[in-house]
Amino acid sequence: MSDLKLQITESVKNAMRAKASERLSTLRFLQAAIKQKEIDERKDVTDADVIAIIEKQIKQRRESIAAYEQAGRTETAAQETAEMVVLQEFLPQAATETEINAAIDAALAEVQALGITGNPAMGKVMAILKPALAGRADMSTLSGLVKAKLG
């Protein structure tokens, strides 16, 4: 069993003891998504799988928050934000701006050394960066930074 999955299980137990119902529901929703992936793929999840699930749920929350704020539903947006904060606890330490720029520069150099430029380079660079910065940087922001450096 992955360390992250064990950590989430412990957090569920702690939330139950503390009677933190909002936190508990977010964690249970996350556990259900992890269990679903294990059933679908018929294997135990790795920490990388769990991070991918958490990132997907955070992305969904970000989209919901934007939609709720546009609709003037600030209370619901605040609830989604609180859920997102709970989920972010389980992600690795965020990469610093310096680390992100260094990773982008290294990936660009690697791709350019292969003679790939322009639009095809974008996909190759992102393919290198995604596993290196998974859970540590927002991929849409990363994509924008890469596009700016390529442009």
Image: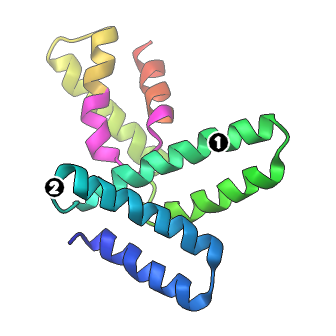
Q: Nearer the viewer, mark 2 or mark 1?
A: 2
Judge from the rendering whether residue 15 lies leftward or rightward of residue 39; answer left or right: right
Which residue is drawn at the image coordinates 44% and 62% (left, top)? 30
Pointer 1 local density, CA inside 10 Å: few below 14, some 14–19, many at least 20? some
Name the quarter where the C terminus is drawn.
top left
**Amino acid identity at mark 2:** Arg
Name the quarter where the N terminus is drawn.
bottom left
Viewer-nearest residue: 32 or 75: 32
Which residue is drawn at the image coordinates 40% and 66% (left, top)? 31
Judge from the rendering whether residue 44 lies leftward or rightward of residue 79; answer left or right: left
Question: Which secondary structure class fits the magenta region best?
Answer: helix
Viewer-nearest residue: 115 or 73: 73
Q: Is residue 85 above or below residue 65?
A: below
Counting the numbered discs, the total is 2
**Amino acid identity at mark 1:** Ser
Which residue is drawn at the image coordinates 54% and 82% (left, top)? 15
Q: Which residue is mark 1?
A: 64
Q: Is residue 20 above or below residue 86?
A: below
Residue 137 lies in magenta, yes or no? yes
Which residue is drawn at the image coordinates 49% and 68% (left, top)? 27
Disc 1 element: helix
Earlier in the chain: of badge 2 and badge 1, it is 2
Residue 46 in view (yes/no): yes
Q: Which residue is mark 2?
A: 42
The residue furthest top is 118
Instruction: Please provide percent x and percent y for residue 110.
Output: 20, 26
Pointer 2 local density, CA inside 10 Å: few below 14, some 14–19, many at least 20? few
Disc 2 element: loop
The residue furthest bottom is 17
Q: CA distance from mark 2 to mark 1?
A: 30 Å
Instruction: Please provide percent x and percent y for residue 48.
Output: 27, 55
Q: Which residues are magenta?
A: 126-140
